[in-house]
């Protein structure tokens, strides 16, 4: 049941917001993975006020697309922790892992008995799936090829934008992370949610993707508000002009944020935005001519394929 406790926000009265970007799991999705029930209506109100709205998630295209459609988002949206940016069905930016390093990375994880999923465009390679990883794979069954990993796989002709590792059964993960960095210095491995870690290109962060999204809309980062809950949201919380953490967020994400909203189980994001619309927009968005004249750049005129190497 959604809490009826009145929420206050600390947004400065002279702070202009032109773009709002939300994380999904743990932020606008509750513990049962249901969408914040007030958000669809709020997004419609924001559009009427000429304020853009989009998503930035660790989910891949197939798992975020239902929420993109439900919220009627026509702007580019961020997937795979910044690994990809899509608009509709079209991929606009693709930050991939170094192709020549992919077989070695997979072999290293396999050698250290780490359960993982390797995501490519059409397939998910699965090694010793834990309950959490199997749940991810099951949601993609029928949408992508699910292939058991073996060291004989060389990934010829394939590229990967994300590897998800489950450390739930590892008591020495900090040491393994350090060893991984020493072996693959041009690749990122960072905590994501719970016991999960994500391996990506160094360019594949929510902060970098947020910069690209804001730039394509000619919106200064100072006019961007973001919502998040976890380690993988911290970079964009710090990058945005106003970062908000949900009250159920990880302590590091809460510490990085400018403000706090209610929990994901209490429609925290939509309740916060209702106050923003009611009490702030009329004071800070009083230049409709300026909004109409704001020039936008072409939304990613060509697909960008990026990797480290």
Image: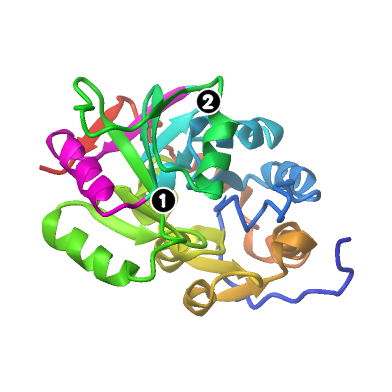
Q: Which residues are magenta?
A: 90-114
Residue 207 position, x and y percent, is: 38, 56
58 to 8, vertically: above or below = above
**In which quadrant will I find the N terminus?**
bottom right
Label 2 Cα neighbours within 10 Å, binned few <14 / some 14-19 / many ≥20? some
Closer-to-camera residue (183/39): 183
For the rendered model, the colour scheme is: rainbow
Q: Which mark is residue 210?
A: 1
Question: Looking at the image, is mark 2 or mark 1 earlier in the sequence?
Answer: 2
Residue 111 counted in the magenta span: yes
Query: Mark 2 falls on what kind of element?
Result: loop
Q: Can residue 203 be seen in the rendering of this structure?
A: no
Taking depth in this image into account, of 246 and 9 the one nearest to the observer is 246
Residue 49 visible somewhere in the drawing: yes
- 154 left or right of 139 in image: left
Residue 168 shown left or right of residue 303 in the figure: right
Could you say where residue 205 lies in the image, as x and y percent from the top left? 35, 52
Numbered tag placed on residue 88 in the rendering: 2
């Amino acid at each position: 049941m959604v809490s009826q406790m009145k929420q206050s926000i600390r947004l400065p009265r002279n702070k202009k917001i032109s773009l709002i970007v939300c994380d999904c799991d743990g932020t606008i999705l509750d513990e049962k993975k249901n969408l914040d029930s007030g958000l669809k209506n709020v997004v419609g109100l924001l559009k009427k006020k000429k304020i853009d709205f989009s998503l930035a998630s660790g989910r891949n295209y197939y798992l975020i697309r239902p929420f993109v459609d439900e919220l009627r988002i026509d702007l580019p949206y961020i997937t795979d922790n910044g690994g990809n940016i899509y608009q509709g069905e079209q991929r606009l930016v693709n930050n991939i892992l170094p192709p020549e390093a992919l077989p070695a990375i997979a072999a290293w994880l396999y050698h250290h008995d780490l359960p993982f999923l390797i995501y490519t465009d059409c397939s998910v390679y699965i090694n010793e799936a834990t309950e959490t990883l199997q749940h991810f794979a099951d949601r993609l069954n029928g949408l992508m090829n699910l292939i058991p990993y073996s060291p004989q796989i060389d990934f010829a002709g394939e590229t990967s934008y994300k590897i998800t590792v489950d450390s739930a059964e590892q008591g020495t993960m900090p040491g393994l992370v350090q060893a991984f960095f020493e072996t693959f210095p041009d690749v990122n491995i960072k905590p994501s949610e719970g016991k999960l870690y994500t391996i990506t290109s160094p360019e594949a962060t929510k902060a970098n993707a947020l910069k690209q999204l804001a730039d394509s809309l000619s919106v200064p980062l100072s006019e961007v508000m973001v919502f998040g809950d976890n380690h993988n949201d911290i970079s964009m919380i710090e990058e945005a002009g106003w970062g908000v953490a949900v009250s159920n967020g990880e302590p590091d994400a809460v510490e990085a944020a400018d403000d706090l909203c209610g929990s994901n189980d209490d429609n925290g994001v939509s309740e916060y935005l209702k106050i923003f619309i009611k009490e702030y927009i009329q004071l800070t968005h009083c230049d409709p001519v300026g909004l109409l004249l704001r020039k936008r750049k072409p939304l990613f005129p060509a697909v960008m394929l990026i990797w480290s190497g």
